[in-house]
Amino acid sequence: MSETDTTATPPATPPVIEAALDEPRIVSETGPAARVARIVAPVLGDLGYRLVRVKISTNQGPVVQIMAERPDGTISVDDCEKASVAISPVLDVEDPMPGQAYRLELSSPGIDRPLVRESDILRAVGHEARIEMMSLHYNRKRFRGWIEGIEGVGAARVLKLRRIDARADEESDVRLPLVDLDEARLVLTEALIRESLKAGKASLEEPASDEDAAAPEEAPRRGPGRFAKRNATPVPRKAK
């Protein structure tokens, strides 16, 4: 058994990952959230966005939060507004939560984002994450550590993680089956914030195309921040 090494730091340059619009998720919802996901995913796809996660909360009245992004991991405030306008009438017709009034929120995944696709995990190599499995592995379900990548093919694919929460008598380098992954989320660290700010700055400094030069407009406000407050759309329901 190896001891935990907590001195590791994320790589200076994150890997460049090409992701497809139709890349399947390896983590999905259950219950009412799953019904909402099945409805909104095709609508988002038609607009050029990908569904990240659907969450339903009831702390201050029912709220349906839909996280979305472009395949490159970015999304703007205008993108969220566009998606909200397209999704609202579809949910009205499909009515995935019969008899309930709720508020619809469209947002980015945030800096400490959930990792729901292989491309998410590969982009996060070198960063710290919390992992939760559906069943026991190495005598536990929860792990925390540096993401080191993915290996294997098909159902044998595993997430390689260098743990920072391992005791002296536990394995620090673990391989967790992707088919059993229940939840994965980045941990908000200074390195992650710096990388996010750097990526946001680079996107704003990209040279404009000829089409953009012919019709200049305000640069899209990209970034990791959440847009839920601005994009909240009330969806009234009548009890059936």
Image (cartoon, grey):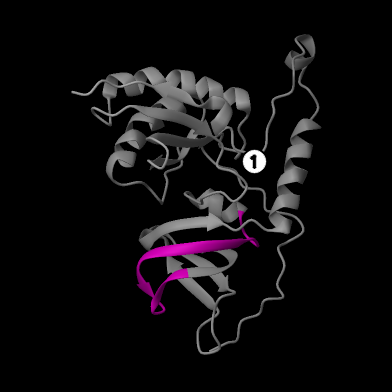
**Which residue is at 29% across, 39% downward?**
32
Question: In the image, residue 184 lies at what x, y percent?
Answer: 48, 57
Is residue 134 found inside the magenta-colored segment of the image? yes
Question: In the image, residue 239 lies at what x, y percent?
Answer: 22, 24
- On the question of residue 104 being in view, the answer is yes
Residue range (magenta)? 124-142
Residue where numbered disc 1 is placed: 224
Is residue 168 found inside the magenta-colored segment of the image? no
SS at mark 1?
loop
**Which residue is at 35% across, 20% downward?**
236
Q: Residue furthest front?
A: 60
Where 33 sits versus 187, above or below?
Answer: above
Q: Residue furthest top?
A: 214
Question: In the image, residue 102 lies at what x, y percent?
Answer: 37, 29
Residue 92's image quarter?
top left
**Mark 1 surroundings within 10 Å by alpha-carbon count, few (fewer than 14), some (14 through 19), many (20 or more):** many
Residue 55's image quarter?
top left
Q: Nearer the viewer, residue 112 or 118?
A: 112
Question: In the image, residue 209 lies at what x, y percent?
Answer: 76, 21
- On the question of residue 151 being in view, the answer is no
Where 191 sits versus 8, above or below?
Answer: above
